[in-house]
Amino acid sequence: MMKVMKFGGTSVGKPERMQQVAELITATKQPKLVVLSALSGTTNTLVNISHALAHAQKQEAAQIITNLYTHYCQFIQELLPEPVYQEMGKKIVDEHFDFLQIILRISFSEALNKDILAQGELLSTKLFSVYLQSRSITHQLLPALEFMVIDANEEPDLAGIRSRLLPILAGHPDCPIFITQGYICRNVRGEVDNLKRGGSDYTASLVAAAVNAEVCEIWTDIDGMHNNDPRIVNKTRAIEFLSFEEAAELAYFGAKILHPTCIWPTQQENVPVKLLNTMQPEAKGTTIVAAVEESGPKAVAAKDGIYAIKIKSSRMLLAYGFLRKVFEVFEKYKTSIDMITTSEVAVSVTIDNTAHLDAIVKELTPFGQVEVMDQQSIIAIVGNQLATTPNILSTILQGLQPLPVTMVSFGGSEHNVSLLLPTQYRTQALQLLNTHVFGL
Ligand code: ASP
Ligand code: MG
C-alpha cells in the first residue's frame, strides 16, 4: 500500500532542508507519493509579480523577477554542487525564468496569473528530482497538471483525479517514489489553475484518497496540532489523536497547520492523516482518524476578523418563516454564517466575509433593527462528545468570567463550543482557557 508524504514550503525552502526530505522519503522501502510545495516565500513573490503586472508596473515586476532568479541560482549552487547536476538545475531555473521574462512582454490576464503562480511548485519538484538523481535515488516525477483537476465550480474532482492518476501509477509498477506538485491543477477549460493558497495540503489529501493510501503524512515545521496557539500562549501541548471532525473544526477556526478544506477527501476514503515535524521526525505528531476514544475538550482556537450582526424584531415573536427570510439575504450575497444564536425577539449571526456587508444590512433593515459589531473573535473549543462532557460549559464560562462574552453557541455540534468576544480580549481568552480547561 502506498503512503503519501507532503512537504510544505519551509521543509523544502533551504538546500539542507530539501536534502533532509530526501532522507525522510528513503527511510523506508514502502512505495510513496511525495507532494511538494514551492520553496518558502516563492508563491508570495509570484503573487507580487502578478500584482505588479496587473497594475501595469512592469519595472517593479522585472525587479522582483531578477531578485527571485538570484535566489534560485544560489539555491542550486548549494543543493547541487556537482557540475553536471548543477548544470541540469540551472537549465530548469533558466527555463522557468525565461517564461517569467516573456510574461513581461505580453498582456496580463487571469489565466496568465495562474500560470505565474504555478511556477513555484514546478521549480521545487523539478529541482528536487535533479537532487534525487544526483544521489541515484530511483523515482518518477509526475506532472500534477496531468491528473489534478477541478470542476466547473472550481472544486476538486476526486473521481476525475483518481481515473487519471491510477493508470499513470500503473505505468510504473516498480517505482518506489513518485514526486508531484502540490497546489496546481487544471480547470474545466483545460487551463492551469490552483487549489488556492495553502492548497498543497489539499493536493496531498486528494491524492491520498484517490490511491487509497495507507496514510497521508503532512510534514511541517511543528510537531503536530497543539491544544492552543503556540504563537500566543506560552504552554501548549501537541495533540496525539484527533477525529476528522475535530481536525476540520480546528483547521477552520484558525489552527494554521492544516488547510481547512483539505480534510474531506481523506475522511471520505478513511485514510488516516498524520501531522509530522521535519525538524523532529521522531516526534509522535498528531494522528487524525475516523473515530477517537477519549471524550472531552482537546484544543482551543481563535478566529479574528469576525463581524456580528444582530437583527431585533418584535415581529419575530411567535412568527414563522422569519429565520428563513434572514438567511435568504445571506444566501443571496454568498456570505456564509459561522455562528448563530437566537432569542424570542432577536437573532445574531457572525460572518467573516464583509464584501457585501452594506447590501446585507440594507436588505435586513425591513425585518427589524440591525446592529453590526466589528472586530470580534470566535473562540472555538473543540473536542469529542463535548455536549455530554460534564460541566464543560460552566468550566469554560468560569474561566472566561472576567471577559465580556457576547455570544455562545453550544450543542450545535458534538465537537465544538464557540464563543464570541471583542478581538482585544482574544489573547486573554486563550490564556484563561489554557489554564481553566486544559490545566496548563
Ligand atoms: N505554494 C502554495 C502557497 O504558498 C501552496 C502551498 O504551499 O500549500 O500557497
Ligand atoms: Mg501550508
Image (spheres, helix red, strand yellow):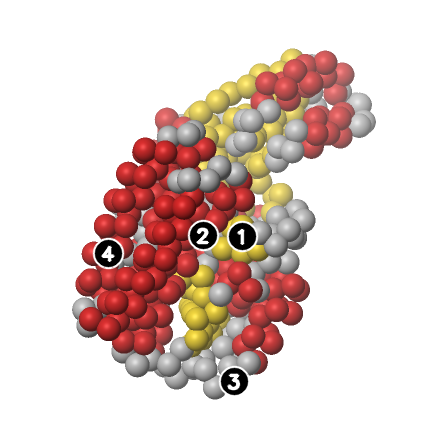
Q: Which residue is mark 2?
A: 118
Q: Earlier in the sequence, mark 2 or mark 4?
A: 4
Picture coordinates of residue 295, whole percent (x, y): 51, 58
Q: Earlier in the sequence, mark 1 or mark 2?
A: 2
Query: Marks 1 and 2, Cα distance to the nearest angstrom?
Result: 8 Å
The three-letter amino acid code for the residue at tag 1 is Val
Picture coordinates of residue 229, whole percent (x, y): 35, 45
Q: Is residue 252 above or below residue 316?
A: below
Q: Is the residue under label 2 in contact with that under label 1 (CB below 8 Å)?
A: yes
Q: Residues within 10 Å of mark 1 (few under 14, many from 20)?
A: many
Which secondary structure, mark 2?
A: helix
Residue at the limit of the structure toward the bottom, as seen here: 174
Whether residue 282 is visible to the viewer of this picture, yes or no, is no
The three-letter amino acid code for the residue at tag 3 is Pro
Q: Nearer the viewer, mark 3 or mark 4?
A: 4
Mark identifier at residue 73: 4
Q: Which residue is mark 3?
A: 173
Work out whether residue 210 or residue 66 is closer to the camera in this orientation and state it: 66
Residue shown at 80% from the left, 23% from the top:
319
Query: Marks 1 and 3, Cα distance to the nearest angstrom?
Result: 28 Å
Query: Marks 4 and 1, Cα distance to the nearest angstrom?
Result: 26 Å
Q: Is the residue under label 1 in contact with that under label 4 (CB below 8 Å)?
A: no
Picture coordinates of residue 141, whole percent (x, y): 44, 71
Work out whether residue 321 or residue 25 is closer to the camera in this orientation and state it: 25
Q: Is residue 97 above or below residue 268?
A: above
Mark identifier at residue 192: 1
